[in-house]
Amino acid sequence: MIHSRHIIIVILAVFALMSVGCHHDNATMQQLAGFDSMVYHQQEREALPILQKMDVNGFNDEEKSYYSLLLAMAQYKCYQPFTSDSAINEAVEHYRKSGDKVKYLKALVAQGCVLEDLGHLDLAVESYHHAEELPLATDSSMIAYAKLRMGVLYQNQIIGSNTIALQKLQEALPLYRSLGDRHYELICLSSIAGIYRNIEEKHDSAVFYLNDAIDLAKSLNEQYVVFANLFLLSEYYLVREHDYEKAKHYALQAISTDGITIDHPRAHYRLASSYLFLGQPDSAVYYLNKAPIAKSAMDSIVYYELMSELEHRYWKNEGKSKNYIQQAHAIADSLTMNSLNHRLLAVEKKYDVQLAELNKIKYQSRFRGALLALAGVIIASLLLLLGLMRYRNRLKMKQNEAEMLKADLEDSLTNLKKMQRLLGDGEQSDDGKNNHSNKLRAIVNQQIDAVQQLMKLSYQYHGEDFAVKFREAMTLPKTGDESNYWSNLQTLANDLHDNILVKAQETAGGTLNDSELNLLALYCFGFSFTTIMVTMGYKHIGTVYNKKNQIDKKLGVPDLDDFVNNYR
């Protein structure tokens, strides 16, 4: 009898423990479900600090996965940066195996957001693409969001064509309309209009979507969005259609938007231009004087173009008019140069990354070989076999590297020639008027020659041999006067960066030597340390770091970026 009573007590205790465990699990999942509702209904700012303080040590796999996807989405929506994607990757894998399609969809979208923030754009698109492939009935709002993010990535991050961006945004738009989500519908309308504005034959479509976006923004009381789209309409009619009456109409509406103060100089400049072309210069001057101070490079270009027209049409001062337009062209040239350098160095930077990865693999292989050799002849034999396999893979990787470099070189050459056409083949002049453009054109031509030389080498050498020749070719041209090259480069750096070299020499008390000024000039144009090393003929990358540190000390700044950014 006693024995039976003990058995009954044990059974009841087991059931009690099970009920406590289930209660804990249910309570935790219910709590996380509450945060789910907050994160996905625009209350992420309230949810994030609570999620970050939660103790997850006692969570099981299901709870950890749910927590990870909610925390990732809350961080992303609150613009907090990520340092790792390991937690969200584990959540995606958990839900892929568990069969919970709703949470799997949410985890995929969160994974895309994390990868996007970390700069892995191709992988982010892949995550979003897996999300949008799930059945629409799983969660149409999340699938719409995945399409929206893909559209924005293709539109803004230059990872693909605008055709794909337009397709994804147009797929997301009807989904948001069916869901009644007017906030994201507005984002889709504005983004689609932005794409159509850049397509020559689709400007009418851009106007259609801009008007729809304005109406929706007004109904949502999104005053800044109303302003932005009215400004875009004004600019469209002024620059594209030359319909100055409509341009004036929309610009007036933009700067008189109620309930918000817009610090946007270009809106006033475009309104002033509309009045000027309508033959009302007094009104143009009035709105020019009301405009906020230009802050960005694009604001400055529009300002100088407007002042040039005013000097020409209103004050009849051709000298000042030409001076203003030259200043506008100088700023435009600097933007072109920065874009050019970014494209030119893309191949070299990619090569550096690949070379670093190959060296990392090589060092790891040597270290492992040294350890395994201690285990004896049998392990050494296995290591040798492994080394042969890795060597074969490395050769294959180098071959692939050569092919990728070749493709990137062809793309760089296309972009350079496009820049060359934009700069034109204007007549060379020694009177100083075209000196800036002549120098820029000469540098572009010089870089085209360098890329063409690299392309020839890519056909003559392969793998490691091409890597060596790539390094040898990335030097100053063998023809021409080298000192003249550096003189032109310093002149151009001063021209585009507010006399930065002159001011640097003044700050350093005249202690900067020629090589330090040359390095600073290259640094102004965004050249990587590897490119500077090769261009200046140094043998080791450490030399560039040492030179940079010397310049930092002479200028009295913690980092050279701080000094250069003041003159961009």
Image (tube, rainbow, N blue to C red):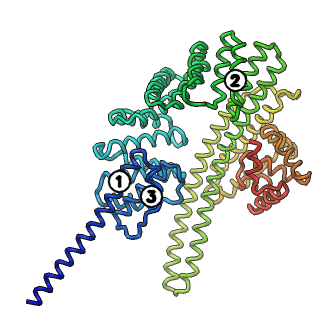
Question: Secondary structure beneath disc 1?
Answer: helix
Residue 199 visible within the image: no
Q: Is residue 59 above or below residue 128?
A: below
Please name the amino acid that badge 1 sits on. Gly
Q: In the figure, is residue 147 to the left or right of 11?
A: right
- Mark 3 Cα-neighbour bin, 10 Å: few <14, some 14–19, many ≥20: few
Q: In the figure, is residue 153 to the left or right of 525?
A: left
Q: Which residue is mark 1?
A: 34
On the rendered image, what quadrant is the C terminus found in?
top right
Please report the residue visible at 81 percent of the width from the left and 37 percent of the height from the top: 495
CA–CA distance in space, label 3 to label 2: 46 Å
Position of residue 152 measured from the top left corner of the image (x, y, whole percent):
49, 40
Disc nearer the start of the sequence (2/1): 1
Disc nearer the start of the sequence (3/1): 1
- Mark 1 Cα-neighbour bin, 10 Å: few <14, some 14–19, many ≥20: few
Question: Secondary structure beneath disc 3?
Answer: helix
Viewer-proximal residue, 396 or 530? 530
Question: Secondary structure beneath disc 2?
Answer: helix
In the picture, the disc for residue 50 is: 3
Viewer-proximal residue, 36 or 171? 36
Q: Which residue is mark 2?
A: 290
Q: Is residue 174 above or below residue 68?
A: above
Q: Furthest-right residue in view?
A: 510
Position of residue 91 measured from the top left corner of the image (x, y, whole percent):
39, 60
Please name the amino acid that badge 3 sits on. Ile
Please name the amino acid that badge 2 sits on. Lys
- Mark 2 Cα-neighbour bin, 10 Å: few <14, some 14–19, many ≥20: few
